[in-house]
Amino acid sequence: MTLRLNISNNYVYVLVLSSIPIEKSNFKNTKTPKEALRNQENTQQQTEMNHKRLKTKGIFLDLDGTIVDSTGAYLEAARIAFCAIGKKTPEDQVLLEIPRRIELRFTIDDLTHGYTKEFMRVYLEAYYSVTGSKTKLFPNISATLEALSAKSKLALITMRHCPNQVVQKELDCFGIAKFFTHVVTALDTSKPKPSPEALIQCAKSLDLEMCDCIIVGDSVNDVRAGKAAGARTVALLSGLFQRKELTKECPDLILTDVNVLPKYIE
């Protein structure tokens, strides 16, 4: 789960009929690449704004790729692991494919040259050792959490396999622990996402019905867990997964990042 730009694959075609002939050689696209990009971003934002605002009493937020940018931790852990197995470190794009595949339970044998067991042992140990120094809050997160907490109870669900106290300490260091009523890590459940177990635990802790809750995250597993639990789902484009992958999971809402979420919550 590391920031990237995602462009919608939807295009609008306009057919203009005119009795005035136009010479092909004189017909030029006057839009610069930056203008074209800005138009696509505006179209994407307008699509998001057209979605219905959501009523909720509880919001369950993912951590990596949602609240914190873990790109640096993913890259550092992968570099350490490749060095440990004596293999050349691939490009960053390949390194970021590793946590994505791990979450989806896809093989990484082709990336580790068959040394997956040795690689994973070092990779996971390295990842948890560098998260404190290599992860950082996404911009404006504190203000966003304050706005959301004024509208709803907040809980944090992370599938990091580490003690709850470790995550709580990280949240304290970022100054955002005060916003969360409940925190769940992978060690607090018997089955990780996409199992709904963590969400069910949060709903019980917050004394809420699941139909009144929303899960927000950057992963397909966040959406799958939400649907399995009966919660509404908000997918974010701030992590490892692209719009096309998230769209296939049919979330209730797809947003660029968590900072735009408050305006969709009643």
Image (cartoon, helix red, strand yellow):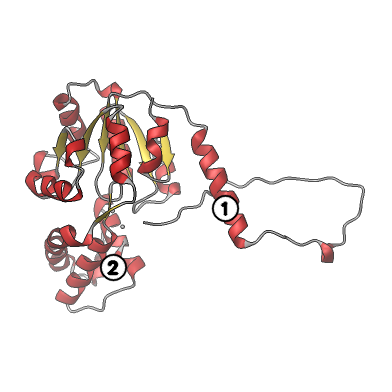
Tell me which residue sits at (28%, 68%) in the image.
111
Image quadrant assignment for residue 131:
bottom left
Q: Is residue 235 left or right of residue 104?
A: right
Query: Dot 2 corresponds to which residue?
Result: 110
Three-letter code for the amino acid on which mark 2 is drawn = Asp
| Coordinates of residue 40 in the picture (x, y in percent) | 57, 50
Image quadrant assignment for residue 209:
top left
| Coordinates of residue 9 in the picture (x, y in percent) | 54, 49
Of helix, strand and loop, which one carries label 2? helix
Q: Which of the labelled discs sits on residue 213, or is there none?
A: none
Tell me which residue sits at (61%, 47%) in the image.
11
Is there CB contact under 8 Å for labels 1 and 2?
Answer: no
Tell me which residue sits at (28%, 38%) in the image.
145
Query: Dot 1 corresponds to which residue?
Result: 38
Q: Is residue 155 above or below residue 12?
A: above
Q: Is residue 38 above or below residue 194?
A: below
| Coordinates of residue 139 in the picture (x, y in percent) | 34, 51
Three-letter code for the amino acid on which mark 1 is drawn = Arg
Q: Is residue 51 left or right of residue 202?
A: right
- Nearest to viewer (mark 1 / mark 2): 1
Q: Is residue 199 above or below residue 167?
A: above
